[in-house]
Structure formats: structure tokens, C-alpha cells
Amino acid sequence: MNLLHTQDTHPCVASASELRSDAGQRDVVTRGIATLGELGVVPAVEYLKSNGVRPKVIERVLLEPERRRTLA
């Protein structure tokens, strides 16, 4: 399933280019994941897009939970 029409590349873990850039981005993504659980995929995608999260990151964090970072 490709909600964002990005190129399908699915390595086992996040690549160096997908590393989180800052704490603000982390907080937005964390809230987007919470929105997924509370309201579903469409509101989560819209929230993340409206906060400037790149489509590849949105796809990875919402559709591939095994590839999410652990909160440390």
C-alpha cells in the first residue's frame, strides 16, 4: 500500500538519510503516530504533511511500524 505515491524502497532499517533531524520533528512524528491510533490513517497523514514531514518518512512511520525508532 502506497498512500503517498513515493518510490517503493523498503530496507530493513532507517537509512542515514532518514535520520531524525531535530526534536521538533520527533515530536511531530510522535503526535502523528498517536493520531493514527486515535483517528486513523487519513488524519495522521494530513497532520504530518501539514507539519512538513517528508512523504517517505510519513509512509515509513505510519505503514511500517517495525521500522520506527524506539523512544529513548
Image (spheres, grey):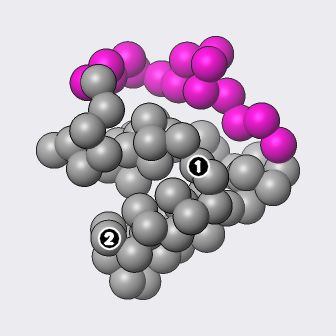
Majority secondary structure of the magenta segment?
loop
Is 9 above or below relative to 43? above
Rendered image: mark on residue 42: 2
Residue at x 41% of width, y 62% of height: 45
Q: Earlier in the sequence, mark 2 or mark 1?
A: 2
Is 11 above or below relative to 53? above
The number of numbered discs placed on residues in the rendered structure image is: 2
Q: Secondary structure at mark 1?
A: loop
Residue 33 rendering spot, x and y as whole percentages: 50, 64
Question: Nearest the camera: 72 or 47?
Answer: 47
What amino acid is at disc 2? Answer: Val
Q: Is residue 70 left or right of residue 38?
A: right
Whether residue 30 is visible: no
What amino acid is at disc 1? Answer: Val
Rendered image: mark on residue 62: none
Q: Secondary structure at mark 2?
A: helix
Residue 15 rendering spot, x and y as whole percentages: 55, 17
Whether residue 25 is visible: yes
Give the residues drawn in magenta, as a range. 8-22
Residue 16 rendering spot, x and y as whole percentages: 64, 16
Question: Nearest the camera: 5 or 33?
Answer: 5
Residue underneath mark 1:
53
Residue 70: in magenta span: no
Residue most extreme to the left: 1
Residue most extreme to the bottom: 38
